[in-house]
Image (spheres, rainbow, N blue to C red):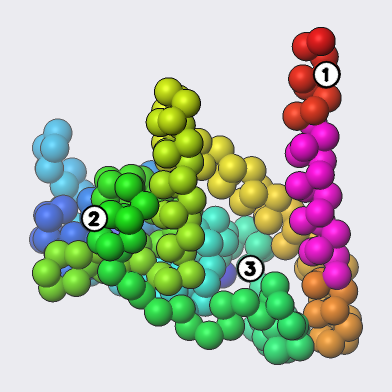
């Protein structure tokens, strides 16, 4: 469990724009963290005014490190903060590191620290707006890095495909006279994240304690079957739905 920050108001002198500047994050992202319980609320002094302090900067930096150095999704980070048992003990984390070392493809992907890249060119190429990128970050689809000195947003190279996919989805919709947006991806993010939470529970219950090499092989083979099941079962559900229309 990660200890929760103290909510003492000593030194809470930062306004939202100060907190954004000091953390390098957009106000939308900070408000999202507060709504999701990842960050304590500010001390309100008026309807549209609140003050923040060092505790907020420390927590934002911790979230950044957990996302970008340990590749944890926001749900997993919140679980650590809440202490609900979803995290792994230090011994289990060492075991997971051994499993990753023995993995060949899916589990080993991202083993190297992903590099940040300026989002501007990728957004322009995909036809995606900066506001849409921030909306994806708010929805937990991808982490957005700090802004560069010239004000450009950065994303991890491993996440560029999400920007490109949203662009393709928007183009398909435009050609057909239909509007697709970040909200449409959010539906799948929620579904996959819920599935992932259950998968982690299975790992803790059935895999922890297995020889790391055997666990890596079993996980790789199982994932291939699960991915095949998800794709084919989804297609089957769609076919069966339309079959009822005839």
Asked whether residue 89 is in view, the answer is no
Front disc: 2 or 1: 1
> From the image, which quarter does the C terminus lie in?
top right
- Give the number of the disc on residue 40: none
How far apart, in angstroms, are the residues tagged by discs 1 and 3?
A: 43 Å
| Span highlighted in magenta in the image | 221-237
Q: Are marks 2 and 3 in contact (CB under 8 Å)?
A: no
Q: Are marks 2 and 1 in contact (CB under 8 Å)?
A: no
Residue beneath disc 2: 26
- Give the number of the disc on residue 87: 3
For label 3, count other residues whose C-alpha is less than 10 Å away and answer few (under 14), some (14-19) or many (20+).
many
Magenta stretch holds residue 158: no
Indicate the secondary structure of the residue bearing disc 3.
Answer: loop
* Horizontal side, residue 26 vs residue 73: left or right: left
The residue positioned 83% from the left and 50% from the top of the image is 229
Specify which label sits upstream in the sequence, 1 or 3.
Answer: 3
How far apart, in angstroms, are the residues tagged by discs 2 and 3?
A: 28 Å
Quarter of the view holding residue 147 = bottom left
Q: Is residue 103 above or below residue 188?
A: below
Indicate the secondary structure of the residue bearing disc 2.
Answer: loop
> From the image, which quarter does the N terminus lie in?
bottom right
Specify which label sits upstream in the sequence, 2 or 3.
Answer: 2
Residue beneath disc 1: 243
Residue 66: x %, y % from top left:
47, 72
Question: Residue farthest to the front?
Answer: 175
Quarter of the view holding residue 59 = bottom left
Magenta stretch holds residue 224: yes
Indicate the secondary structure of the residue bearing disc 1.
Answer: helix
């Amino acid at each position: 469990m990660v200890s929760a920050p103290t909510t003492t108001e000593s030194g809470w002198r930062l306004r939202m724009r100060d907190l954004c500047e000091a953390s390098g994050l957009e106000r939308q992202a900070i408000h999202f963290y507060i709504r999701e319980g990842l960050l304590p609320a500010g001390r309100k002094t008026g309807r549209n005014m609140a003050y923040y302090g060092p505790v907020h900067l420390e927590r934002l930096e911790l979230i950044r490190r957990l996302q970008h150095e340990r590749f944890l999704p926001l749900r997993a980070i919140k679980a650590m903060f809440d202490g609900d048992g979803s995290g792994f003990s230090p011994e289990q984390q060492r075991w997971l590191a051994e499993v990753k070392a023995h993995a060949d493809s899916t589990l080993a992907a991202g083993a190297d620290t992903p590099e940040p890249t300026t989002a501007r060119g990728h957004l322009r190429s995909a036809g995606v707006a900066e506001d849409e990128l921030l909306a994806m970050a708010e929805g937990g689809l991808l982490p957005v890095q700090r802004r560069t000195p010239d004000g450009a947003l950065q994303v991890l190279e491993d996440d560029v495909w999400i920007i490109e996919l949203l662009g393709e989805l928007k183009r398909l919709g435009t050609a057909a006279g239909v509007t697709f947006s970040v909200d449409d991806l959010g539906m799948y993010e929620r579904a996959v994240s819920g599935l992932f939470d259950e998968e982690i529970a299975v790992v803790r219950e059935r895999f922890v304690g297995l020889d790391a090499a055997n666990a890596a092989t079993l996980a790789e083979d199982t994932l291939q079957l699960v991915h095949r099941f998800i794709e084919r079962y989804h297609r089957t559900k769609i076919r069966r739905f339309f079959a009822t229309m005839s």
